[in-house]
Image (cartoon, rainbow, N blue to C red):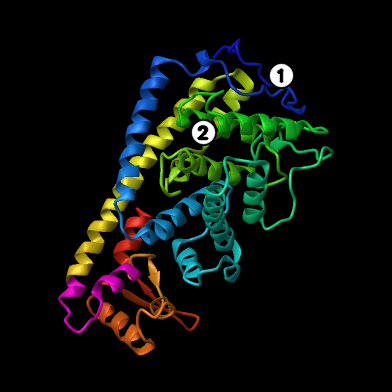
Amino acid sequence: MPEISTYRINPDRDKPWNGLPDLPIAPELWRTPELLEQLGHAREALGRLHGRSVAIPNQGLLINSISLQEAKASSAIENIFTTDDELYQAFSETKADRAEGPAKEVLRYREALWSGNDFLKSEAGFTRDYFVRMVREIKQVEEGIRPPFTATVIRQGGSGPHAGKAIYTPPRGSGILEAKLDNLLAFVNDDDAYPLHPLLKMAIAHFQFEAIHPFRDGNGRTGRIFNIHYLVKKGLLDYPILYLSRYILAHKEAYYGALAGVSQRGDWATWLRYMLTAVEVTANLTFDKINRILEARDAVLAVIQAQKSIRRPDQLTQKIFTQPITRIKHLTEDRTYALNTARDYLNKLVELQILEKKSVQGNIYYINRELYSILED
């Protein structure tokens, strides 16, 4: 594809791209019939998901189950892998600092997803502080924007003939990162000066953030958290539940290829089409998962309600569908049930084949296999 004349590309991958153009990009780079059609598909799918999530009374179902899968997929993009068993067992402890290894990093991502969402509720818009907060929570470091002397270079991974070769060198120098971040923040916050649909803004801003690469590490995960937070801030979602990282993980080479296409060839069309397609596909996926979870919950509730010996069947069903793995303490901590009652009820659900009982290192877990399988799919 020939270089796009309206966008200044990166002439040398081995040198810092201090000439990264400021936003906005020229309208002809995104205003094409194909991209506008794809924008319409993405808007429709996201609107359907938004409407469905608002109607769900038990938001814990979305907060714990869907967002945890997003955290897992986003971490896997960075080659941080954990099994569902490890992840859900760690999550059943409720705090990331009680987990170990990759599961701990995934839970930190999930906590950043929700703490950032809460932080933005009290803010007029996005700030440098927002990005610093996110990367610190993800990485558990006290660092901020990388200093001018850091020789950050993105290199080809693997063991092939091009392994170790520079793919991209982000900007570097006194005040350069701060200035480019301020331009990015003005673009995403000022809808009067930059009147662009939020989905297009999100995709453009995501590239710009990754190109600036303001931190030593954690830029990819911070950028993907920003995607979801931006859609919530702009009212396209009520909760940060879009399972966007699953698409990126499944199309990882295309993701990095499209990013490189912008810096090396000025090919914004491929990047924007990729991101809009990702929104459409994952919005539909999340919508379907929510419906399947609700159908499973209603079916289980009917079985529990038929057991006349179980008190408050609605609350019990809500508890076991809030996350795939339940422990007795989840039913006692908020005084839903007394200890012996909670144990008896969970064991009764095992007899009814609603739950599976599992002992790991002396800890007893009750696995909601129906929910588990839906989330795995």
When the figure is inspected, residue 260 is found, relative to residue 359, above or below; the finding is above
Q: Residue at x 67, y 47 (%)?
A: 132
Which disc, if any, is residue 202? Answer: 2
Q: Residue at x 71, y 43 (%)?
A: 215
Q: Are marks 1 and 2 in contact (CB under 8 Å)?
A: no
**How far is disc 1 from disc 2 in space, using C-alphas?**
25 Å
Q: Position of residue 17 (x, y in %)?
A: 73, 26
> Viewed as shown, does residue 147 lie left or right of 272?
right
Q: Is residue 167 visible?
A: no
Q: Is residue 277 magenta?
A: no
User: Which span is picked out in magenta?
Assistant: 303-319
> Viewed as shown, does residue 371 lie left or right of 179?
left
Quarter of the image that includes the N terminus? top right
Question: Which quadrant of the structure image shows residue 250?
Answer: top left
Crowding near the residue tagged with mark 1, few <14, some 14–19, many ≥20 C-alpha atoms within 10 Å: few
Which badge, 1 or 2, is on the more N-terminal residue? Answer: 1
Q: Residue at x 70, y 39 (%)?
A: 214
Residue type at mark 2? Met
**Callout 1 secondary element:** loop
Q: Position of residue 243 (x, y in %)?
A: 42, 46
Q: Nearer the viewer, mark 1 or mark 2?
A: 2
The residue where tag 1 is placed is 11
Question: Which quadrant of the structure image shows residue 349?
Answer: bottom left
When the figure is inspected, residue 161 is found, relative to residue 270, above or below; the finding is below
When the figure is inspected, residue 40 is found, relative to residue 2, above or below; the finding is below
